[in-house]
Amino acid sequence: MFHLLKHIVIRLWLSLMVAGPASLVVLVQLPPRPGIVRPLAVGGAVLAAAFVFLGWAGNRLAWRGVKNRLARSDLLEKAGRGPEARTALRRAVAIYDSFLPSPLARSRLRDLLTARMARFYLARPDGDTAGLEGLRTYLKAHPGDALVAKAWLRAVARQPAWDEADEAAADRIAEVQANDAGIQQVLGRRFLAAGRTDFLALEVYQRVMRRKPEEAAWWNQRLAALFIKEGRCDNFALETYLAAWEEGDHAVLRRGLAACLMRLETEASNRQMLARARTLLEGLDAVDIEILAEGFAATWDAGMPPARPEPKRGRIREAAAGRARRWIHGVATLARESRAVRWMGWIAGGAVVAGVAAMMFYNTFSHLLTSPPPAPPPVPVVGKPLEIVAVTDPFTIQVAAYLKRDHAERFVAELRGRNLDAQWQEARSNDKTWYQVRISHFADRAAALAYGERLKQEGIIDDYYVVNYDRP
Protein backbone atom coordinates (compact mmCIF):
# COMPACT_ATOMS: atom_id res chain seq x y z
CA MET A 1 0.00 0.00 0.00
CA PHE A 2 2.83 2.39 0.84
CA HIS A 3 4.52 1.62 -2.49
CA LEU A 4 1.26 2.34 -4.34
CA LEU A 5 0.92 5.76 -2.68
CA LYS A 6 4.60 6.52 -3.30
CA HIS A 7 4.38 5.50 -6.94
CA ILE A 8 1.22 7.53 -7.64
CA VAL A 9 2.45 10.67 -5.83
CA ILE A 10 5.86 10.78 -7.54
CA ARG A 11 4.43 9.83 -10.91
CA LEU A 12 1.72 12.50 -10.63
CA TRP A 13 4.27 15.10 -9.54
CA LEU A 14 6.51 14.30 -12.52
CA SER A 15 3.48 14.35 -14.82
CA LEU A 16 2.58 17.85 -13.62
CA MET A 17 6.14 19.01 -14.19
CA VAL A 18 6.08 17.65 -17.75
CA ALA A 19 2.47 18.57 -18.55
CA GLY A 20 2.81 22.27 -17.56
CA PRO A 21 5.40 23.33 -20.16
CA ALA A 22 4.03 20.87 -22.73
CA SER A 23 0.52 22.33 -22.41
CA LEU A 24 1.86 25.86 -22.99
CA VAL A 25 3.68 24.70 -26.14
CA VAL A 26 0.53 23.03 -27.50
CA LEU A 27 -1.72 26.04 -26.70
CA VAL A 28 0.65 28.43 -28.50
CA GLN A 29 0.35 26.36 -31.68
CA LEU A 30 -3.49 26.48 -31.60
CA PRO A 31 -5.54 29.47 -32.84
CA PRO A 32 -6.75 31.70 -29.99
CA ARG A 33 -10.28 31.13 -28.66
CA PRO A 34 -11.99 32.86 -25.71
CA GLY A 35 -12.90 30.87 -22.61
CA ILE A 36 -11.16 28.35 -20.38
CA VAL A 37 -12.61 25.15 -21.80
CA ARG A 38 -9.87 24.65 -24.36
CA PRO A 39 -6.94 25.27 -21.92
CA LEU A 40 -8.48 22.88 -19.40
CA ALA A 41 -9.11 20.21 -22.00
CA VAL A 42 -5.63 20.52 -23.46
CA GLY A 43 -4.03 20.52 -19.99
CA GLY A 44 -6.03 17.46 -18.92
CA ALA A 45 -5.19 15.54 -22.09
CA VAL A 46 -1.49 16.37 -21.85
CA LEU A 47 -1.46 15.47 -18.14
CA ALA A 48 -3.12 12.11 -18.83
CA ALA A 49 -0.70 11.39 -21.68
CA ALA A 50 2.27 12.32 -19.50
CA PHE A 51 0.96 10.12 -16.64
CA VAL A 52 0.59 7.11 -18.95
CA PHE A 53 3.95 7.70 -20.65
CA LEU A 54 5.82 8.05 -17.36
CA GLY A 55 4.22 4.85 -16.08
CA TRP A 56 5.27 2.97 -19.21
CA ALA A 57 8.79 4.43 -19.06
CA GLY A 58 9.16 3.63 -15.35
CA ASN A 59 8.07 0.01 -15.90
CA ARG A 60 10.51 -0.40 -18.80
CA LEU A 61 13.39 1.04 -16.80
CA ALA A 62 12.59 -1.11 -13.77
CA TRP A 63 12.20 -4.28 -15.83
CA ARG A 64 15.46 -3.72 -17.71
CA GLY A 65 17.35 -2.74 -14.54
CA VAL A 66 16.18 -5.79 -12.59
CA LYS A 67 16.88 -8.22 -15.46
CA ASN A 68 20.35 -6.82 -16.09
CA ARG A 69 21.34 -7.06 -12.43
CA LEU A 70 19.91 -10.56 -12.07
CA ALA A 71 21.86 -11.66 -15.14
CA ARG A 72 25.01 -10.09 -13.70
CA SER A 73 24.39 -11.83 -10.37
CA ASP A 74 24.05 -15.16 -12.19
CA LEU A 75 27.33 -14.66 -14.04
CA LEU A 76 29.17 -13.60 -10.88
CA GLU A 77 27.87 -16.63 -8.99
CA LYS A 78 29.04 -18.98 -11.73
CA ALA A 79 32.45 -17.29 -11.59
CA GLY A 80 32.68 -18.02 -7.85
CA ARG A 81 32.33 -14.37 -6.79
CA GLY A 82 29.57 -14.85 -4.22
CA PRO A 83 29.76 -11.47 -2.38
CA GLU A 84 29.59 -9.52 -5.64
CA ALA A 85 26.69 -11.68 -6.82
CA ARG A 86 24.86 -10.92 -3.56
CA THR A 87 25.51 -7.18 -4.08
CA ALA A 88 24.04 -7.31 -7.59
CA LEU A 89 21.04 -9.15 -6.22
CA ARG A 90 20.47 -6.48 -3.57
CA ARG A 91 20.63 -3.76 -6.23
CA ALA A 92 17.92 -5.57 -8.17
CA VAL A 93 15.83 -5.61 -4.98
CA ALA A 94 16.46 -1.86 -4.54
CA ILE A 95 15.07 -1.17 -8.05
CA TYR A 96 12.08 -3.37 -7.25
CA ASP A 97 11.42 -1.35 -4.06
CA SER A 98 11.80 2.03 -5.83
CA PHE A 99 8.95 4.14 -7.20
CA LEU A 100 9.68 3.15 -10.81
CA PRO A 101 7.59 -0.04 -11.25
CA SER A 102 3.81 0.17 -11.05
CA PRO A 103 1.94 -2.32 -8.82
CA LEU A 104 1.13 -4.58 -11.79
CA ALA A 105 4.75 -4.52 -12.97
CA ARG A 106 5.91 -5.27 -9.42
CA SER A 107 3.90 -8.50 -9.36
CA ARG A 108 5.73 -9.73 -12.48
CA LEU A 109 9.09 -8.55 -11.20
CA ARG A 110 8.50 -10.19 -7.84
CA ASP A 111 8.12 -13.64 -9.40
CA LEU A 112 11.32 -13.15 -11.41
CA LEU A 113 13.24 -11.71 -8.46
CA THR A 114 12.15 -14.16 -5.77
CA ALA A 115 12.82 -17.17 -8.00
CA ARG A 116 16.39 -15.98 -8.61
CA MET A 117 16.92 -15.14 -4.92
CA ALA A 118 15.64 -18.55 -3.85
CA ARG A 119 18.06 -20.37 -6.15
CA PHE A 120 20.93 -18.12 -5.13
CA TYR A 121 20.51 -18.65 -1.39
CA LEU A 122 19.95 -22.38 -1.85
CA ALA A 123 23.60 -22.63 -2.92
CA ARG A 124 24.98 -20.53 -0.05
CA PRO A 125 26.75 -22.57 2.64
CA ASP A 126 26.84 -19.74 5.18
CA GLY A 127 23.20 -20.00 6.28
CA ASP A 128 22.50 -16.31 5.69
CA THR A 129 19.50 -15.16 7.76
CA ALA A 130 18.45 -12.72 5.05
CA GLY A 131 18.62 -15.58 2.58
CA LEU A 132 16.27 -17.72 4.69
CA GLU A 133 13.86 -14.82 4.90
CA GLY A 134 14.04 -14.47 1.12
CA LEU A 135 13.27 -18.17 0.70
CA ARG A 136 10.36 -17.88 3.09
CA THR A 137 9.00 -14.89 1.15
CA TYR A 138 9.30 -16.82 -2.08
CA LEU A 139 7.52 -19.85 -0.59
CA LYS A 140 4.60 -17.73 0.58
CA ALA A 141 3.82 -16.98 -3.07
CA HIS A 142 5.02 -20.34 -4.48
CA PRO A 143 4.49 -23.09 -1.87
CA GLY A 144 4.25 -25.64 -4.67
CA ASP A 145 7.96 -25.34 -5.54
CA ALA A 146 9.08 -28.64 -4.02
CA LEU A 147 12.82 -28.07 -4.56
CA VAL A 148 12.88 -24.75 -2.73
CA ALA A 149 10.50 -26.03 -0.04
CA LYS A 150 12.75 -29.01 0.76
CA ALA A 151 15.88 -26.86 0.87
CA TRP A 152 14.24 -24.29 3.13
CA LEU A 153 12.92 -26.98 5.47
CA ARG A 154 16.35 -28.60 5.72
CA ALA A 155 17.87 -25.21 6.56
CA VAL A 156 15.34 -24.14 9.20
CA ALA A 157 15.14 -27.64 10.71
CA ARG A 158 18.54 -26.96 12.29
CA GLN A 159 17.17 -23.98 14.18
CA PRO A 160 16.18 -24.70 17.80
CA ALA A 161 12.96 -22.70 17.53
CA TRP A 162 10.74 -21.33 14.78
CA ASP A 163 9.06 -17.94 14.81
CA GLU A 164 5.47 -17.34 13.75
CA ALA A 165 6.43 -16.61 10.14
CA ASP A 166 8.32 -19.93 9.89
CA GLU A 167 5.35 -21.81 11.37
CA ALA A 168 2.96 -20.15 8.90
CA ALA A 169 5.22 -21.00 5.95
CA ALA A 170 5.59 -24.61 7.12
CA ASP A 171 1.81 -24.98 7.51
CA ARG A 172 1.26 -23.62 4.01
CA ILE A 173 3.81 -26.04 2.57
CA ALA A 174 2.21 -28.94 4.45
CA GLU A 175 -1.16 -28.16 2.87
CA VAL A 176 0.06 -27.63 -0.71
CA GLN A 177 2.70 -30.41 -0.74
CA ALA A 178 0.37 -33.05 0.68
CA ASN A 179 1.51 -35.65 -1.85
CA ASP A 180 5.28 -35.26 -1.25
CA ALA A 181 6.25 -37.95 1.25
CA GLY A 182 9.68 -36.44 1.95
CA ILE A 183 8.31 -33.01 2.83
CA GLN A 184 5.54 -34.53 4.93
CA GLN A 185 8.09 -36.60 6.86
CA VAL A 186 10.29 -33.58 7.62
CA LEU A 187 7.29 -31.55 8.72
CA GLY A 188 5.89 -34.43 10.75
CA ARG A 189 9.11 -34.80 12.73
CA ARG A 190 9.18 -31.05 13.35
CA PHE A 191 5.54 -30.98 14.46
CA LEU A 192 6.18 -33.98 16.71
CA ALA A 193 9.20 -32.31 18.30
CA ALA A 194 7.07 -29.22 18.92
CA GLY A 195 4.31 -31.33 20.50
CA ARG A 196 1.68 -30.20 17.99
CA THR A 197 -1.65 -32.04 17.92
CA ASP A 198 -3.73 -29.58 15.91
CA PHE A 199 -5.77 -30.72 12.90
CA LEU A 200 -3.04 -30.05 10.32
CA ALA A 201 -0.37 -31.82 12.39
CA LEU A 202 -2.60 -34.89 12.84
CA GLU A 203 -3.18 -35.03 9.08
CA VAL A 204 0.58 -34.86 8.47
CA TYR A 205 1.19 -37.73 10.94
CA GLN A 206 -1.40 -39.87 9.17
CA ARG A 207 0.05 -39.11 5.72
CA VAL A 208 3.55 -40.12 6.84
CA MET A 209 2.42 -43.37 8.46
CA ARG A 210 0.26 -44.26 5.45
CA ARG A 211 3.05 -43.65 2.90
CA LYS A 212 5.89 -45.08 5.01
CA PRO A 213 4.41 -48.15 6.74
CA GLU A 214 7.88 -49.38 7.64
CA GLU A 215 8.21 -46.40 10.02
CA ALA A 216 4.70 -46.70 11.48
CA ALA A 217 5.95 -48.38 14.68
CA TRP A 218 8.34 -45.49 15.38
CA TRP A 219 5.60 -42.93 14.84
CA ASN A 220 3.04 -44.86 16.90
CA GLN A 221 5.35 -45.05 19.92
CA ARG A 222 6.05 -41.32 19.95
CA LEU A 223 2.55 -40.23 19.09
CA ALA A 224 1.13 -42.43 21.84
CA ALA A 225 3.46 -40.79 24.37
CA LEU A 226 2.46 -37.33 23.09
CA PHE A 227 -1.27 -38.09 23.17
CA ILE A 228 -1.08 -39.53 26.70
CA LYS A 229 0.90 -36.52 27.89
CA GLU A 230 -1.77 -34.25 26.41
CA GLY A 231 -4.64 -36.33 27.80
CA ARG A 232 -6.13 -37.04 24.40
CA CYS A 233 -8.80 -39.65 23.71
CA ASP A 234 -10.37 -39.85 20.26
CA ASN A 235 -10.50 -42.48 17.54
CA PHE A 236 -7.06 -41.60 16.16
CA ALA A 237 -5.56 -41.66 19.65
CA LEU A 238 -7.23 -45.03 20.38
CA GLU A 239 -5.84 -46.47 17.15
CA THR A 240 -2.38 -45.17 18.07
CA TYR A 241 -2.52 -46.64 21.59
CA LEU A 242 -3.50 -50.05 20.24
CA ALA A 243 -0.79 -49.98 17.56
CA ALA A 244 1.86 -49.04 20.13
CA TRP A 245 0.78 -51.77 22.56
CA GLU A 246 3.00 -54.50 21.09
CA GLU A 247 6.29 -52.74 21.86
CA GLY A 248 5.18 -49.93 24.15
CA ASP A 249 5.05 -49.34 27.87
CA HIS A 250 1.86 -51.12 28.91
CA ALA A 251 1.65 -49.28 32.21
CA VAL A 252 1.46 -45.98 30.35
CA LEU A 253 -0.70 -47.15 27.45
CA ARG A 254 -3.30 -48.57 29.86
CA ARG A 255 -4.13 -44.98 30.84
CA GLY A 256 -4.90 -44.01 27.26
CA LEU A 257 -6.96 -47.15 26.61
CA ALA A 258 -8.90 -46.67 29.85
CA ALA A 259 -9.61 -43.05 28.94
CA CYS A 260 -10.93 -44.06 25.52
CA LEU A 261 -13.16 -46.69 27.11
CA MET A 262 -14.55 -44.15 29.54
CA ARG A 263 -14.91 -41.15 27.25
CA LEU A 264 -15.63 -42.36 23.72
CA GLU A 265 -19.13 -43.11 22.47
CA THR A 266 -19.33 -46.49 20.77
CA GLU A 267 -19.95 -46.22 17.02
CA ALA A 268 -19.31 -48.20 13.87
CA SER A 269 -15.86 -46.67 13.31
CA ASN A 270 -14.47 -47.56 16.74
CA ARG A 271 -16.49 -50.56 17.90
CA GLN A 272 -13.77 -53.12 17.12
CA MET A 273 -11.01 -50.95 18.59
CA LEU A 274 -12.95 -50.47 21.83
CA ALA A 275 -13.59 -54.22 22.01
CA ARG A 276 -9.85 -54.89 21.70
CA ALA A 277 -9.12 -52.26 24.35
CA ARG A 278 -11.53 -54.02 26.73
CA THR A 279 -9.74 -57.29 26.04
CA LEU A 280 -6.35 -55.74 26.82
CA LEU A 281 -7.71 -54.26 30.05
CA GLU A 282 -9.45 -57.47 31.09
CA GLY A 283 -9.26 -57.97 34.80
CA LEU A 284 -9.69 -54.29 35.68
CA ASP A 285 -13.01 -53.26 37.17
CA ALA A 286 -14.80 -49.97 36.53
CA VAL A 287 -13.11 -48.18 39.42
CA ASP A 288 -9.64 -49.16 38.21
CA ILE A 289 -10.46 -47.97 34.69
CA GLU A 290 -11.85 -44.71 36.02
CA ILE A 291 -8.70 -44.11 38.04
CA LEU A 292 -6.50 -44.78 35.01
CA ALA A 293 -8.59 -42.41 32.88
CA GLU A 294 -8.19 -39.49 35.25
CA GLY A 295 -6.86 -36.38 33.50
CA PHE A 296 -8.11 -37.33 30.04
CA ALA A 297 -10.85 -35.53 28.14
CA ALA A 298 -12.66 -36.45 24.95
CA THR A 299 -11.57 -34.19 22.10
CA TRP A 300 -13.91 -32.67 19.52
CA ASP A 301 -12.47 -34.60 16.62
CA ALA A 302 -13.43 -38.04 17.90
CA GLY A 303 -13.32 -39.31 14.33
CA MET A 304 -10.31 -37.91 12.50
CA PRO A 305 -11.08 -37.76 8.77
CA PRO A 306 -8.55 -39.27 6.40
CA ALA A 307 -5.87 -36.95 5.11
CA ARG A 308 -7.02 -35.14 1.99
CA PRO A 309 -4.54 -34.17 -0.72
CA GLU A 310 -4.63 -30.49 -1.43
CA PRO A 311 -5.94 -29.80 -4.96
CA LYS A 312 -3.49 -28.15 -7.30
CA ARG A 313 -4.04 -24.46 -7.90
CA GLY A 314 -3.13 -22.56 -11.02
CA ARG A 315 -0.54 -19.82 -11.02
CA ILE A 316 -3.21 -17.20 -11.78
CA ARG A 317 -5.18 -18.17 -8.69
CA GLU A 318 -2.05 -18.19 -6.53
CA ALA A 319 -1.04 -14.76 -7.81
CA ALA A 320 -4.53 -13.36 -7.17
CA ALA A 321 -4.54 -14.74 -3.63
CA GLY A 322 -1.08 -13.32 -3.00
CA ARG A 323 -2.13 -9.88 -4.23
CA ALA A 324 -5.23 -9.98 -2.04
CA ARG A 325 -3.16 -10.87 1.04
CA ARG A 326 -0.67 -8.08 0.30
CA TRP A 327 -3.49 -5.57 -0.25
CA ILE A 328 -5.11 -6.51 3.06
CA HIS A 329 -1.73 -6.24 4.80
CA GLY A 330 -1.20 -2.81 3.26
CA VAL A 331 -4.62 -1.60 4.37
CA ALA A 332 -3.95 -2.87 7.89
CA THR A 333 -0.58 -1.11 7.96
CA LEU A 334 -2.15 2.14 6.78
CA ALA A 335 -4.83 1.82 9.44
CA ARG A 336 -2.22 1.36 12.15
CA GLU A 337 -0.09 4.30 11.00
CA SER A 338 -2.77 6.84 10.02
CA ARG A 339 -4.43 8.90 12.74
CA ALA A 340 -7.33 9.85 10.46
CA VAL A 341 -8.06 6.21 9.68
CA ARG A 342 -7.98 5.38 13.39
CA TRP A 343 -10.47 8.16 14.11
CA MET A 344 -12.71 6.90 11.32
CA GLY A 345 -12.50 3.41 12.82
CA TRP A 346 -13.49 4.72 16.26
CA ILE A 347 -16.42 6.64 14.77
CA ALA A 348 -17.58 3.61 12.77
CA GLY A 349 -17.23 1.37 15.83
CA GLY A 350 -19.23 3.83 17.95
CA ALA A 351 -21.95 3.93 15.31
CA VAL A 352 -22.16 0.14 15.24
CA VAL A 353 -22.34 -0.04 19.05
CA ALA A 354 -25.02 2.67 19.12
CA GLY A 355 -27.03 0.82 16.47
CA VAL A 356 -26.81 -2.47 18.33
CA ALA A 357 -27.83 -0.77 21.60
CA ALA A 358 -30.80 0.90 19.86
CA MET A 359 -31.94 -2.44 18.47
CA MET A 360 -31.64 -4.06 21.91
CA PHE A 361 -33.70 -1.30 23.55
CA TYR A 362 -36.31 -1.49 20.80
CA ASN A 363 -36.63 -5.26 21.11
CA THR A 364 -36.83 -5.03 24.90
CA PHE A 365 -39.54 -2.35 25.04
CA SER A 366 -41.54 -3.90 22.20
CA HIS A 367 -41.47 -7.18 24.12
CA LEU A 368 -42.63 -5.47 27.34
CA LEU A 369 -45.43 -3.57 25.61
CA THR A 370 -46.89 -6.62 23.87
CA SER A 371 -48.85 -9.21 25.82
CA PRO A 372 -47.33 -12.66 25.91
CA PRO A 373 -49.03 -15.43 23.94
CA PRO A 374 -51.34 -17.73 25.90
CA ALA A 375 -49.65 -20.73 27.44
CA PRO A 376 -50.37 -24.02 25.70
CA PRO A 377 -52.59 -26.48 27.53
CA PRO A 378 -50.77 -29.11 29.57
CA VAL A 379 -50.05 -32.33 27.78
CA PRO A 380 -51.62 -35.26 29.60
CA VAL A 381 -49.22 -38.00 30.66
CA VAL A 382 -50.03 -41.25 28.92
CA GLY A 383 -49.27 -44.48 30.66
CA LYS A 384 -49.11 -45.69 34.22
CA PRO A 385 -46.42 -44.42 36.59
CA LEU A 386 -43.69 -46.83 37.57
CA GLU A 387 -44.32 -48.56 40.84
CA ILE A 388 -41.47 -48.79 43.32
CA VAL A 389 -41.40 -52.28 44.76
CA ALA A 390 -39.12 -53.27 47.59
CA VAL A 391 -36.77 -56.04 46.50
CA THR A 392 -34.19 -58.16 48.19
CA ASP A 393 -32.12 -59.32 45.20
CA PRO A 394 -28.44 -58.38 45.74
CA PHE A 395 -27.26 -57.89 42.11
CA THR A 396 -28.00 -55.59 39.17
CA ILE A 397 -26.27 -54.69 35.88
CA GLN A 398 -24.86 -51.25 35.11
CA VAL A 399 -25.04 -50.35 31.42
CA ALA A 400 -23.81 -46.71 31.30
CA ALA A 401 -22.41 -43.85 33.39
CA TYR A 402 -22.68 -40.17 32.45
CA LEU A 403 -21.34 -36.91 33.79
CA LYS A 404 -24.59 -35.13 32.85
CA ARG A 405 -27.87 -36.01 34.48
CA ASP A 406 -30.00 -35.31 31.40
CA HIS A 407 -28.01 -37.90 29.43
CA ALA A 408 -28.76 -40.54 32.05
CA GLU A 409 -32.44 -39.56 32.18
CA ARG A 410 -32.72 -39.75 28.39
CA PHE A 411 -31.19 -43.24 28.32
CA VAL A 412 -33.42 -44.44 31.17
CA ALA A 413 -36.49 -43.17 29.30
CA GLU A 414 -35.36 -45.04 26.19
CA LEU A 415 -34.87 -48.27 28.15
CA ARG A 416 -38.22 -47.92 29.88
CA GLY A 417 -39.78 -47.44 26.45
CA ARG A 418 -38.55 -51.01 25.75
CA ASN A 419 -40.35 -52.23 28.91
CA LEU A 420 -37.10 -52.61 30.86
CA ASP A 421 -36.84 -51.95 34.60
CA ALA A 422 -34.26 -49.15 34.29
CA GLN A 423 -33.28 -46.45 36.76
CA TRP A 424 -30.39 -44.11 37.40
CA GLN A 425 -28.59 -43.19 40.56
CA GLU A 426 -25.97 -40.65 41.56
CA ALA A 427 -22.41 -41.57 42.62
CA ARG A 428 -19.33 -39.48 43.37
CA SER A 429 -15.75 -40.42 42.50
CA ASN A 430 -12.57 -38.32 42.18
CA ASP A 431 -14.43 -35.05 42.71
CA LYS A 432 -16.84 -35.93 39.90
CA THR A 433 -20.51 -36.79 40.02
CA TRP A 434 -21.53 -39.76 37.88
CA TYR A 435 -25.08 -40.71 36.92
CA GLN A 436 -25.13 -44.47 36.60
CA VAL A 437 -27.81 -46.25 34.56
CA ARG A 438 -28.78 -49.70 35.86
CA ILE A 439 -31.30 -52.34 34.77
CA SER A 440 -33.36 -54.75 36.92
CA HIS A 441 -32.15 -56.83 39.91
CA PHE A 442 -31.17 -60.47 40.25
CA ALA A 443 -30.82 -63.09 42.91
CA ASP A 444 -27.37 -64.25 41.77
CA ARG A 445 -24.52 -63.13 39.51
CA ALA A 446 -25.13 -65.82 36.90
CA ALA A 447 -28.68 -64.59 36.26
CA ALA A 448 -27.39 -61.01 35.93
CA LEU A 449 -24.72 -62.08 33.44
CA ALA A 450 -27.19 -64.05 31.34
CA TYR A 451 -29.62 -61.11 31.24
CA GLY A 452 -26.87 -58.64 30.30
CA GLU A 453 -25.61 -60.90 27.49
CA ARG A 454 -29.13 -61.18 26.07
CA LEU A 455 -29.57 -57.39 26.03
CA LYS A 456 -26.16 -57.00 24.40
CA GLN A 457 -26.93 -59.55 21.68
CA GLU A 458 -30.21 -57.81 20.91
CA GLY A 459 -28.33 -54.53 20.42
CA ILE A 460 -30.14 -52.72 23.23
CA ILE A 461 -26.92 -51.98 25.14
CA ASP A 462 -23.27 -51.84 24.13
CA ASP A 463 -21.73 -53.26 27.30
CA TYR A 464 -22.45 -53.89 30.98
CA TYR A 465 -21.01 -55.18 34.19
CA VAL A 466 -22.54 -56.68 37.34
CA VAL A 467 -22.66 -54.54 40.51
CA ASN A 468 -24.36 -54.68 43.88
CA TYR A 469 -27.97 -53.56 43.87
CA ASP A 470 -28.65 -50.45 45.97
CA ARG A 471 -32.22 -50.38 47.18
CA PRO A 472 -34.03 -47.10 46.53
Image (cartoon, rainbow, N blue to C red):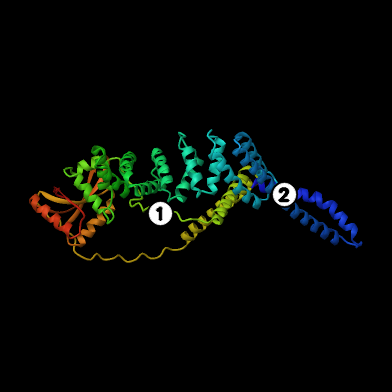
Dot 2 amino acid type: Gly
The answer to whether 153 appears left or right of 90 in the picture is left
Q: Secondary structure at mark 1?
A: loop
Q: Is residue 370 above or below residue 331?
A: below
Q: Earlier in the sequence, mark 2 or mark 1?
A: 2
Dot 1 amino acid type: Arg
User: What residue lies at 72% left-to-right and 52% top-to-bottom?
Assistant: 55
User: What residue lies at 54% left-to-right and 42% top-to-bottom?
Assistant: 135
Q: Which residue is disc 2 drawn over?
A: 58
The dot on residue 308 is 1
Distance CA(mark 2)–CA(mark 1): 45 Å
User: What residue lies at 19% left-to-right and 62% top-to-bottom?
Assistant: 418
> Residue 142 appears at what percent x and percent y?
53, 49
The answer to whether 72 appears left or right of 294 in the picture is right
The answer to whether 463 appears left or right of 23 in the picture is left
Residue that protrudes farthest toward the front in the picture: 79
For this rendering, which residue is in front, 68 or 274?
68
Q: Is residue 424 visible?
A: yes
